[in-house]
Each structure stands twice: as C-alpha cells, then as structure tokens.
Image (tube, grey):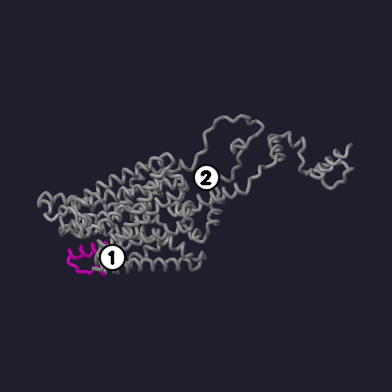
Amino acid sequence: MTESAWDRQKSMSASSPHITGRRESEPGFTDSTTPKALDIAVPGGFRRHHLQTTPRPVVSKALRDQIIDRINSVYDPFIGNILSQDNDEYDEMNVEERARSLLMTPPVTLPMHRRFSPREMGTPTEKTGLIKTETAPPKSKDSDKTTTLWHALLTLLKSFVGTGILFLPDGFRSGGILFSPLCLTFVAALTLYAMLRLLQCRELVGGTYGHVGFKAYGSWGRRMVQISIIMMQAGFCCTYVIFVAQNMSEVLEFWGYDVDTSLLILLQIAVYIPLSWIRYISYFSISNLIADVFILYGLAFILGNSFWLLATQGPAKDVELFNQQDYPVFIGTSIFTFEGIGLVLPTQSSLNQARQKRFPRLLTWTVVGLLFFYSFFAGINYVTFGSGIAPMVTSSLPRNGWSSSVQFGYAFAQLLSYPLFLFPAVKIMEEMLGFPRRASGQKVAKNCFRAVAVLATVCIAYFGQGRLDLFVSIVGAFCCVPLSLVYPPLFHLKLNPNLTWMDKIVDSFVIFVGLITFFYVTYSNLESWSK
C-alpha cells in the first residue's frame, strides 16, 4: 500500500460516523444508527435510508434572514386580527407569545382520539406510485374569505356616508353653487388617486396602512400614520359630540324643554365613558346597523322635504355662484366628507384574490357615484334654503314631529357611532404608551385612560361648539389631509424607485396640493374663527 493510499484510508476512518473507538488495525463494528438489511426490507425502508444518508441542504444566513424578515413584515401587523381577542389573556401577550399561541393551537376539526393510516395522512409507502397523479390542490385560506363585492360596496358606503354629508349644503353656501361642485370633483379625484396609490403600495409590501408606512420610512413612517389616525378619529368624535348636542337641543326645544347645548355636551360623558370600556368592536355590530337605518331615513326625509319646498315655494333668491370670503371653509368640509381611506385596505383584504383584483374598479365607481350624490344632495338643499341654511341641514328643516324624528334618529345614530370612532384611536394610544401586561390592574389602567380620552374629546367639543362649520373644516384640513392626500403618494414614491417621470410628477403634485391645503385651509379657518 502506497503512502498516499494509506493516508486516504486513515482520513476515511477518522471521518466515518459509524466507526468509533477503535485502533486502525482493529475491524470496524456498526452502531445502532447504521442501516441494516432488515431495516430496509420494510415499507418505506429505502426512502428512510435515503433521507438518513443524504446530507440536508444548508440554508445560507442571508436567505434565513430574508425569510425571517418577510415573515415578520407580513404577519406582525395581522397577528392581532388572526387571534381571538375575546379573552383577557390576549392583552397580556406580546407578539412572540401571540404567534406561539396561534401555532400551538390544536385543530379542533380533527378527532384527536383516532389514528390515521399512512394513506389518509398522505405518507408515502412502498405501494405509493413513483409518479404522482394529479390531485386537487389543498384548500387555501383564501377560499375561506366569503366577502362579496356587494358586501365591500356596502362597507365603503358606510365609511363615506356619515355626518359629513349634512354639512355639505352649508359648504355650498361657503363656496358657491358653481365653485363647490368643481372643488368637490377635484377633491374626489385627488382622494381616489391617493387610495389607488395606497392599494398599489399594499401589493408591494402587504399589511395595513401603518405597515406600509413602516416599510417606506421605518418607525417614523408608522408613527406618522398612527398619529394622524389618532387626530382624525378624535376630530370625528368631537364633531359627533357637538352634532348630538345641537340636534337634541332642537328636539327638546320643539317639545317645550329649553336645555342648553353646553349642558347636553357634558351629559354625554355619562354615556361615552361606559361605552369606551367595551374591549371588542364586534359588540357594536347591532348598534352600527341601527345607526345605518337612522341615517338612511334621515337622508331620504331631507331630500323629500327639499323637493316639496322647491315645488311649493321655488328656489331661494340669494344663491351665489362663488363666495370669495368663505370658500376655504368648503375645501376642508369636502375633504372631511370624502374621508374613508382608513377602511380601504381592510375592505380589500377581506376579499379573496380574484375579487381583490376587481376592488380598484369598485372603489372608483363608488367614489364617482358618491360625487354625483353629494353634489346633488348639497346643491338641492342650498338652492332650497339659500344663504339662510344652517351649518347642519337638519336644523333648517321645518319644526314639526317628522323633522324632530329625523334629528333624534340622526343624533342617536351618531351617539352609537362615537365608540366606533374612538376605538382605533385609544387602541393605538394604549400601544404607544405601553400599558403593563400584568393581569392585575391592567383593566383599571385602561379604563381610566379611556375615560380621560373621552373627557378630552368632550372638552374640545365644548369649546368648539360656537362655529361648527369652521370646526368641521379644520378637522378635514388638519386631521384628514395627511392620511387622505399626503401619505399615499409619499409612500408610493419611496417604495417604487423605478417609476416613470410622469408618475413621479403626479405623485409630487398630489403631495404639494395636500400640503398647501393642510397649511392654508387650517390657517384661514383659524383666522376666521378669531374674527
């Protein structure tokens, strides 16, 4: 034996996993892990031997890091929605514990006492063919999404149609019968463009609005979205408090009770604080349905009343084409009316893949239809009442039992809607403040914080009740513009470095218009308020 052959034999003996604890001159003995002929001559033996002796593929660290980052970026935003939140233990878990709880949950649809055969479990045996036949693909989670496009349309309508439409007739007075439809069309086009850009961002990175901001600008992007959502939801809540108080004051006045609006604002604290303590938004489904019925009833009655007054009394004589003094008020009001971007991503994600591709077209036609309806509703009421129209069109209705029922129904609907708009804001703030996850004292701390949030919105409403039209415009310009017009094209530019020059120009133009609206309209409304 040559020296090189002897060296090779020594190296093979040292590296063999089955030859241990012997000298080079002694024969080798197999251990318990060495396959035997008896082990191979059983069903599946050759396959097991192949799996045991074949080296496992090594995944590089870069690929592992990429997979982990992808999992975190996709599943972290949804981990709170996947798990059931109907128990207190959920609030005590961090993201890692929630993920582990999800993965360790046993399947309840399978009988655990029964053992399944290899054929039922899909385990290959010696009788399994080497060439697999075509079988039906496994049922994906996407097929479990039963939300139809009709359901998505109803969700979009509920997100857009609220109290904002009641301020549009007075907004037409502020802008003029010619300027207001043009401005409303421009705002609708910009809002729709921003929504479609946000949907394109979701196709790239997935997740929620905050997650899109995180992928674009990191933690700062997520925080910007969260702070804007808090301001927007708080602004809506303050508007609802004033709306409920003023409508109920007029209803009570019709029935002979003179109650000050300020007192009614403060009395709502006793209703909103207990409602804010409800942990799960699913409990508001019935109240949300009742609110929708009252809103539809109110809109139908207001339109019918305007048609009747136009037929009997004719149009008002003091209708202006353009109001040079108050037109900034209408810009903020129109943005407030078309605010619904917060539900665009959740609505699309509730659809399966085939319907998600048709969602942008559904969203486009929804916005176009609402544009015509808003313009028609506001124009008819402004032409009917003229410059004497009230900030809320319900206050311009004739004083009778029917109009009082409309005001009461709309006020009751917004009373029930207040917790729905407060819920996202307090959840974000609780996460940002880092409440303790201990079971003891956690509920008390959260309840106290939510009570403080209610008191803050009521206090703002108390001082803003004097000029409701300006207050609504400020909420639209200051609170809604960043989410509706600025962030979507800004994130789109960041996440798509290979855009065409035309796309970059349009995105930059929308951002510029949003920033100008944010500063100019807010400043103009504050200046008008001070006067």
Q: Is residue 187 left or right of residue 102?
A: left
Left or right: 80 in relation to 15 = left
Identify which amino acid the numbered label 1 is placed on.
Leu
Q: Which mark is residue 467?
A: none
Q: Residue furthest front?
A: 501
Q: Does label 1 or label 2 sit earlier along the sequence?
A: 2
Q: What residue lies at 38% left-to-right and 51% top-to-bottom?
A: 508
In terms of image quadrants, where is residue 34? top right
Q: Residues within 10 Å of mark 1 (few under 14, many from 20)?
A: some
**Quadrant in the picture for the C terminus:** bottom left
Residues 386 and 519: in front is 519
Q: Which residues are magenta?
A: 243-262
Asked whether 254 falls inside the magenta stretch, the response is: yes
Side of 401 where 474 appears, left or right: right
The residue indicated by pointer 2 is 109
**Circles 1 and 2 in contact, beta carbons < 8 Å:** no
Residue on which disc 1 sits: 526
